[in-house]
Amino acid sequence: NAGVTQTPKFQVLKTGQSMTLQCAQDMNHNSMYWYRQDPGMGLRLIYYSASEGTTDKGEVPNGYNVSRLNKREFSLRLESAAPSQTSVYFCASVGMSSYNEQFFGPGTRLTVL
Amino acid sequence: GQSLEQPSEVTAVEGAIVQINCTYQTSGFYGLSWYQQHDGGAPTFLSYNALDGLEETGRFSSFLSRSDSYGYLLLQELQMKDSASYFCAVNFNKFYFGSGTKLNVKP
């Protein structure tokens, strides 16, 4: 099992550009999450998907959109990147058998110039 | 959002015991989790308390008291590899994290 995978690992954007961060899990988990982590800080929830076909806003959804493409994949889109979106982005998933344990991907390090 | 307070940094020596506290101002959550994150890495799950009391997992233990709005992570027999950041998080089926405690283990 690969667990949770994220692409790309690193990305540099110019202000106003758009991009999509990809996340996939192979653990048959129902719930998936997108977080951002700024230097020296904790993780803040951007969006989450409790099950295939549903998505909900987290703490900091402005400037982002998500798509739960199927049970495996949950993507995060920045339509018009801003320097304030420079951060490390983590995707995570949770299964029904261990609903409290999140499994995290390796992260995407995004810089917006 | 939810407010979870943790000390920003703790230093301890190898072999010692250290306690990392988490105080919160929320209610109605399913449980309190703890995660470890090494520099440049992803968070990894350590422990979870659904109920009040102590949960033990090897060298790590976690405690929750809902009446005191308080939890802690206890690390015993500290090793150099325990140097990392530790985060508490509350579970509402979505998760809210504290700002983290950086643990420095010295020889």
Image: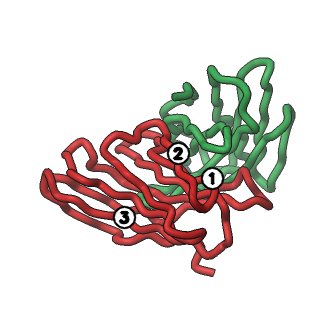
Q: Secondary structure at mark 1?
A: loop
Q: Which chain letter matches label 3?
A: A
Nearer the camera: disc 3 or disc 1:
1
How far separated are the C-alphas under marks 3 and 2?
A: 17 Å
Classify B69 as above or below A109: above
Q: Nearer the viewer, residue B88 or B79?
A: B88
Q: Which residue is mark 2?
A: A56
In the visual, does B94 lie left or right of A17?
right
Q: Residue at x 67, y 44 (%)?
A: B93
Chain A palette colour: red
Q: Say few, some or many: other residues with alpha carbon within 10 Å of mark 1 (under 14 / 14 to 19 / 20 or more).
A: some
Q: Are marks 3 and 1 on the same chain?
A: yes
Nearer the camera: disc 3 or disc 2:
2
Q: Say few, some or many: other residues with alpha carbon within 10 Å of mark 2 (under 14 / 14 to 19 / 20 or more).
A: few
Q: Nearer the viewer, residue A106 or B92?
A: B92
Counting residues from the start of the chain, the first of labels 3 and 1 encountered is 3
1 and 2 marks in contact (CB < 8 Å): yes
Could you tell me the amino acid type at mark 2?
Asp
How far separated are the C-alphas under marks 3 and 1?
A: 19 Å
Q: Nearer the viewer, residue A62 or B106?
A: A62
In the visual, does B41 lie left or right of B29?
left
Q: Residue at x 34, y 71 (%)?
A: A8
Classify A48 as above or below B98: below
Q: Which chain letter matches label 1?
A: A
What mark, if any, has residue A21 been given in the picture?
3
Q: Which chain letter matches label 2?
A: A
